[in-house]
Amino acid sequence: TAQSSRADNDLSAPNDLEAWWLPFTANRSFKARPRMIARAKDMHYYTPEGRAVLDGAAGLWCCNAGHNRDEITAAIQAQAAELDYSPAFQFGHAAGFAIASRIAQLAPGDLDHVFFCNSGSEAVDTALKIALAYWNVQGQGSRTRLIGRERGYHGVGFGGISVGGIVKNRQFFGSLLAGVDHLPHTYNRAEQAFSRGEPEWGAHLADELERIVALHDASTIAAVIVEPMAGSTGVIPAPKGYLQRLRQICDKYGILLIFDEVITGFGRLGTAFAAERYGVIPDMITFAKGVNSGTVPMGGVLVRKGIHDAFMKGPDNMIELFHGYTYSGHPLACASALAAQDIYRDEKLFERAKALEPVWADAIHGLKDLPNVLDIRTVGLVGAIDLASRPDAFGARAFEAMDRGFHDHDLMIRITGDTIAISPPLIITEVQIGELADKLGKVIRAVA
Ligand code: PLP
């Protein structure tokens, strides 16, 4: 192992960037011109030199309450001092039950039970496994097929990439991806360009599920999984009526419907869950990120009562579901989630996101006449700007926007291909929305 030249635990001036292979990162480019973050507070990150960077991405769509909130810090510290870890296999602790109840109360309908894990990817794998196991306990073991959607992102587990529809996330890992099919994605620039909220066009694309059912037969299909708003692939809000139509078709054929709300959960679209915004109750909801404002790894699956109860049979000393993680319901994650949920409730942050949606839409759509802007989409406190690609250099323009945004304009944004995605913490003020749009405008001009 190569020796680092710095003292072992001196984090003030890291000078050896070699060992950490960063995820979903252009590593060589990063290491040539690092974007280092030292601390954070509320709406800002701070670089090691102390430069304040406006967080236009809520970290990675997760810090909905803003950064380093004192109440969350205190809760994590107190929990660590009281109970560092306890197993969730055959044992339990109060914070875990408390946060499960809180989340179940937030969720619509009879989504009454919560299975905890540590990330969105694990939440997706958990939901898919519960779907398969459910059909087995129901005596319909032939229902094994899982239906995702093109351009869907469901994390990076083998289950998630199978139902996911992002080419690069699938192409090198192909051999386990059988037994799935995909709905078409719902983006059509000619029909939807510069839409605010849910586009008018596209509900009929849910009918493609009928075609998939006709091809495979409903008796082979376990579940359909979609993001109510496809986030990672460039922000594609559900067309008006689309999710309702999907629910109807799933009901018609007895297929389970899973909403992947890892991004949309906890206020991003102005409601606790997108299911509430759309008035559609799925059979399961996956969540992560915003559950504790990104402070400690945590994910989970909300499950409707009927599905949960179907497992509660047989001898009562028997394990009902052979699934779980060492860190399911980790005490620190649960404590931080309780504190984050208190902030969401007390500061009415979901309602705030809803109230700010038109202000946000005006600000982001105000960038439409800038060079290379092909489309802008907004929904809730999310926005996306598609930039024209440079000739023979797909992704280069947005990459430069992200890099120059950080280094030259004190702004953190997300990119995918040549699309910029923005999703600030829900505590953003109207003034800061203006500031963010202003910085974005400068960045887009800089990469013209
Ligand atoms: N599902 C959706 C909809 C996501 O947006 C993400 C992450 O962005 C995931 C799953 C995966 O979450 P994680 O990175 O925590 O595994």
Image (cartoon, rainbow, N blue to C red):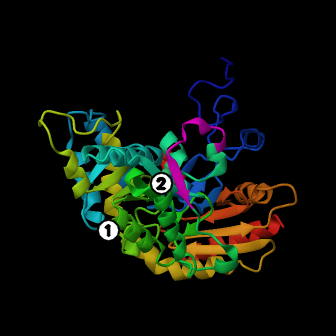
**What is the magenta range?**
171-183
Q: How many marks?
A: 2
In the picture as drawn, the residue positioned furthest to the right comes out as 391
Query: Which quadrant of the structure image shows residue 383?
Result: bottom right
Q: Residue at x 26, y 67 (%)?
A: 109
> Residue 233 placed where, x, y %?
61, 59
Quadrant including the N terminus = top right
Does mark 1's beta carbon lie closer than 8 Å to ligand 1?
A: no
Q: Is residue 382 above or below residue 171?
A: below
Q: CA distance from mark 1 to mark 2?
A: 48 Å
Residue 390: within the magenta? no
Q: Position of residue 376 (x, y in %)?
A: 66, 74
Question: According to the image, label 1 marks what residue?
Answer: 346
User: Mark 1 or mark 2, which is nearer to you?
Assistant: 2
> Could you say whether the residue bearing mark 2 is in a helix, strand or loop?
helix
Q: Quadrant of the C terminus?
A: bottom right
> Which badge, 1 or 2, is on the more N-terminal residue?
2
The spot of residue 349 in percent (x, y) is 40, 70
- Asked if residue 24 shows in the view, the reply is no
Q: Amino acid at mark 1?
A: Asp
Q: Is residue 275 left or right of residue 360?
A: left
Find residue 82 and report its horizontal and vertical position in percent.
25, 37
Q: Between 64 and 26, which is closer to the camera in this rendering?
A: 26
The residue indicated by pointer 2 is 216
